[in-house]
Amino acid sequence: MQTLETLAQSFDGVQNAYAIQAGREVRVVVDPSSISDEDAGNLSVRMRERIEEELDYPSSIRIIVIREQRYVETAK
């Protein structure tokens, strides 16, 4: 699982990566100021390709890229 997280974090714009469900899923949080919505989709494809090339795994691995922006204002 550590290898999966390390691989995901090696991509530019990735803030955090978490392997969950015994390594069957990786959730990747990206910096919304450096990764666009389109780039986030492309990133998941590139990650899938590298995982297929570099890692040995018994089943499938689901890749979830999370790009989130929050805007909060407080009126007084």
Image (cartoon, rainbow, N blue to C red):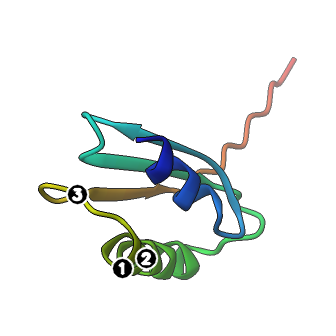
For the residues labelled 1 and 2, say whether their Cβ atoms are less than 8 Å apart.
yes
Q: Nearer the viewer, mark 2 or mark 3?
A: 3
Cα separation, mark 1 vs mark 2, equals: 5 Å
Residue 25 spot, x, y in % from top left:
29, 47
Label 2, label 3: how far apart the Cα atoms are: 13 Å
Q: Which mark is residue 50?
A: 2
Label 1 environment density (alpha carbons within 10 Å; few <14, some 14–19, many ≥20): few
Q: Nearer the viewer, residue 26 or 57?
A: 57
Residue 67 shows in this picture: no
Q: CA distance from mark 3 to mark 1?
A: 11 Å
What amino acid is at disc 3? Tyr
Q: Quadrant of residue 55?
A: bottom left
Dot 2, how many residues are within 10 Å of its Cα: few (below 14), some (14-19), or many (20+)? few
Answer left or right for 36 relative to 73. left
Q: Residue furthest top?
A: 76
Mark 2: which secondary structure? Answer: helix
